[in-house]
Image (spheres, helix red, strand yellow):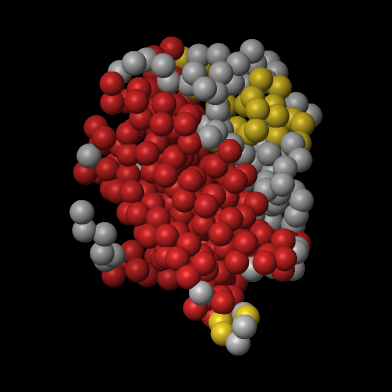
Amino acid sequence: MDLSLSGEQRQLVDSFAALFARESTSDRVRAVEPLGFDPALWKALVDTGSVEMAVAQERGGSGASVLDLALIAEQYGRAVASAPLVEAQVAARLLADCGGAGAELLGHVLAGDRLVTFTPRAGRNMRLELVPAGAVADWVIAMVDGRLLAVPLGDNRTGVQNLGSLPLADIAVDADFVVLADAVTALELFDVALDLWLTLTAVAVTGAAGRALELAVEYAKQRQAFGAAIGSFQAVSHPLADSATAVAGSRLLALRAACAATDESDRMRQLAAMAFAFAYETARDATRRSLHIHGGYGFSMECDVQLYYRRVRGWALTYGEPAVALDRVADARYGKGVYGRRTS
């Protein structure tokens, strides 16, 4: 698999890296905690057309590939950005796939006057839990009791406090919803959207892990102990090397999942879930090591690495532990028909 970037893709990466460097500094990330939503950053993302990129051209969007979206997600993760970009892109793409049923809401999304999110956890008994951006979004697209619904948000949500400082909410699905699809069609549409969410989230948390590792390396070069930089000690350098190897592998797997949307569509379900599981474990370990290398300073709120340590756990757990994703791999590979048993 050739992961070398084209000139246009390099320009895309540079453009969003610059946007996040300008609009998602660590000071800005801290300033919007504990809610974890930066309206100014969200406006900047909408103005760049980042949400409409996820929608096909024939549906009014820009028709970006999944790989293009993944390259943006990597920069998003590196900045631990306080805006629900991944969920908004997945929701927009899903509304487009629903055709006429989602056309009206999609029009509002493309116009930039509605924030619509997607939740990877299927709901039961007309309730949704830990909805990403549920505390700030206008609508959520969700699988609830066998139907794919567009649910308006307002007084029916309850914010969920969390150490990741994410705008999570539990939702009571009232009667004022739109049925986008039901039965087999609903499950097929939801599964495709979930594959995309798992892939983009895997890339994002890998990007965050990579940046946290860079912060640890920079600190290990500067911090002195016994007359030498602590990075010269094997107890510091070897764990960093292990994490660097894992981050490289996680990035490769996540981008392969993104490429599979075009090149190996029959394998995307497996690859997306595998990428998510490996990315979660990689980011968890890399951010923990990075924080420990900073010593007591790493636990202080002034240290940037703690932002990464907290955020990657929150992002991933809106779906579940790695074992939940590995169940999905097994279901896709062997057809056991047991998808969702760990999240029930």
Residue 303 appearing in the image: yes
Nearer to the camera, 70 or 105: 70
**Farthest bottom residue?**
227
In the image, residue 92 above or below residue 51: above
Quadrant occupied by the N terminus: bottom left
Residue 103 appearing in the image: no
Name the image quarter holding residue 220: bottom right
Q: Residue at x 63, y 34 (%)?
A: 131
In the image, residue 256 above or below residue 15: above
Q: Residue at x 64, y 13 (%)?
A: 125
Relative image position of residue 271 (x, y in whole percent): 32, 39
Relative image position of residue 148 (x, y in whole percent): 51, 21
Name the image quarter holding residue 199: top left
Q: Is residue 227 left or right of residue 160?
A: left
Name the image quarter holding residue 309: bottom right
Nearer to the camera, 215 or 290: 290
Nearer to the camera, 106 or 308: 308
Q: Is residue 145 left or right of residue 265?
A: right
Q: Is residue 97 left or right of residue 125?
A: left
Q: Residue at x 52, y 22 (%)?
A: 342
Relative image position of residue 257 (x, y in whole percent): 32, 44
Relative image position of residue 344 (x, y in whole percent): 56, 18
Q: Residue at x 76, y 51 (%)?
A: 34
Q: How many marks?
A: 0
